Image (cartoon, grey):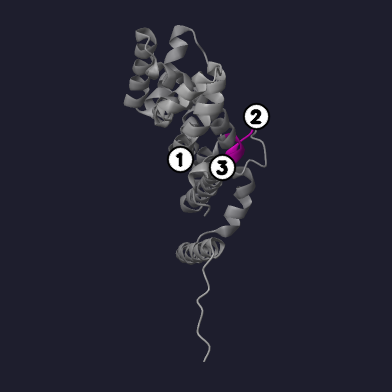
Amino acid sequence: MAPIVARPVTPHRLRFDFRRRVWTTWALLLAILLGGLYQLGLDFALIRAKLPFMLGLHLSPNGFVQGVALTLLVTAISMVFAVGLAVLTALGRLSRNPVAFALATFYASFFRGTPLLVQVLLIYLALPQFGIILSALTSGVMALSLNYAAYLAETIRAGILSVPRGQREAAMTLGLPPLLIAFKIIAPQAARVIIPPAGAQFVSMLKDSSLVSLMGLWELNFLAQSYGRSTYHYMEMLLTAAFIYWLLSILFELVQHRLEVRFGRAYGAPRR
């Protein structure tokens, strides 16, 4: 009888088995969730009728974007401004200049220590008393940017501090200019630490963008509540909005995962 030779399991095979089990579990849980929702007797005809408006495939009566399109617009603009402001705040927190350090810490403390809802209302309602009148969209973007930049600044600061000091010193020894050191040496290594928590904050920003509905903007949450009141089918509209937010969050998480893999290749980041 020939001896039995065990075949080595390749990393590719292990990843395939892992993914197969993950997707099988996801499919089972999703089937249970959908089965439970089906038992609620939801009006799916109403959902199909209102879904194009909630997705932003139609403009609002005043000719502006609405629904998911407006939600993504607010989130995208806020993300850009939040990242820029967070970088400046993080550099201020790391600065040896007492004025820069004081400004950065005061700003971060105020916007982390007060509720986002209060900040939205202050920007939209209080600034006009000083002669500064902003549109609802501008006010919403400003509030989200200022709030999330205060949190993101600490994430960026932690990422910068995670880079060994010897990396910067070695680059300076080679005579590299400071900007090149920052963008080519420090930033790529810090990104590995920054991306996971920053991705979670951007997903949270996506959902917190619903607060702009307080200023009359027809974003996803506003439409869900409006259609719920007008049709007396709150459950259908709110569950539809919840699923749309969930799908958008999954897309954000997939982008985050790709970035994690890209910046973690030198550290053996798992490709799952």
Q: Which mark is residue 196?
A: 1
Q: Find residue 138 and report its horizontal and vertical position in percent.
A: 54, 22
Q: Earlier in the sequence, mark 3 or mark 2?
A: 2
Q: Position of residue 70 (x, y in %)?
A: 59, 34
Q: Which residues are magenta?
A: 63-70
Callout 2: SS: loop
Q: Residue at x 34, y 12 (%)?
A: 102
Question: Residue 57: x percent and y percent?
Answer: 67, 42
- Residue 211 percent location from the top left of the image: 46, 32
How many angstroms separate mark 1 from mark 3 (CA)?
12 Å
Earlier-in-chain disc, 2 versus 1: 2
Instruction: Look at discs 3 and 2 and give the one toward the viewer.
Output: 3
Residue type of the residue flagged with mark 1: Pro
Residue density around tag 2, few if under 14, some if 14–19, many if 20 or more, within 10 Å: few
From this viewpoint, which residue is outermost toward the bottom? 1
The disc at residue 262 is: 3
**Mark 3 surroundings: few (<14), some (14-19) or many (≥20) residues within 10 A:** some
Q: Is residue 136 visible?
A: no
> Quick check: 63 left or right of 225?
right
Q: Nearer the viewer, residue 53 or 144?
A: 144
Whether residue 64 is in magenta: the answer is yes
